[in-house]
Image (tube, helix red, strand yellow):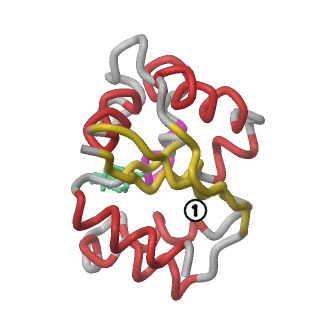
Amino acid sequence: MTERSLVLIKPDGVERSLIGEILSRFETKGYRIADLTMLTPERALLERHYEEHQGKPFFEPLVEFMMSGPVVAAVIEGNRVIEGVRTLLGPSEPTTAPGGTIRGDLGRDWGAKVQKNLVHGSDSPESAEREIGIWFA
Ligand code: IDP
């Protein structure tokens, strides 16, 4: 069944010139980039995107980090792409993410209050549709 996932290349990924490398991992895997845009997001958009994390200690640092520069938002399409993108990303923490994953190969710990882990990928079909609606309104 064809699904869509919302992927964000976070400000650390853009700053480190990893847009091409990261997008190519999805394309090489066989997924299709169905939509693509680059923007510096405003607080209101990020508060909606991360609403499940409101009230957590890393919420404010996370929003500040995500506002700190341009991000790339993409809609990635394919069979079981939501699960597939999460597999390609690896776990949230770059230090312990396995080699072969985007976060494991390209990310590291920056000693900040927020995990700068290069990429976001939707975690469920419901989140994906909600997030695509936010970033591609
Ligand atoms: P995910 O991006 O791997 O799906 P989420 O739990 O949705 O992880 O968290 C969203 C983002 O918030 C993470 O990618 C990371 O940047 C940041 N984050 C999550 N948990 C922590 C934490 O415990 N400390 C610092 N930052 C965190």
Where does label 1 land, which residue?
65
| Residue 112 shown in magenta | yes
Depth check: give the residue in front, 80 or 49.
Answer: 80
Q: Is residue 126 above or below residue 12?
A: below
Q: Is residue 54 above or below residue 35?
A: below
Per the image, label 1 sits on a secondary structure element best described as: helix
Spot occupied by residue 38 in the image (x, y as percentages of width and height):
73, 61
Callout 1 amino acid = Phe
Which residue corresponds to the image point at 64% horizontal and 74% vertical from the top-left? 41
Which residue corresponds to the image point at 39% horizontal and 40% vertical from the top-left? 78
Position of the N terminus, as image quadrant, is: top left
Q: Is residue 104 above or below residue 47?
A: above
Spot occupied by residue 39 in the image (x, y as percentages of width and height):
72, 67
| Residue 12 shown in magenta | no
Q: What are the residue bounds of the magenta stretch?
A: 110-115
Which residue corresponds to the image point at 72% horizontal and 32% vertical from the top-left? 20
Depth check: give the residue in front, 90 or 1.
Answer: 1
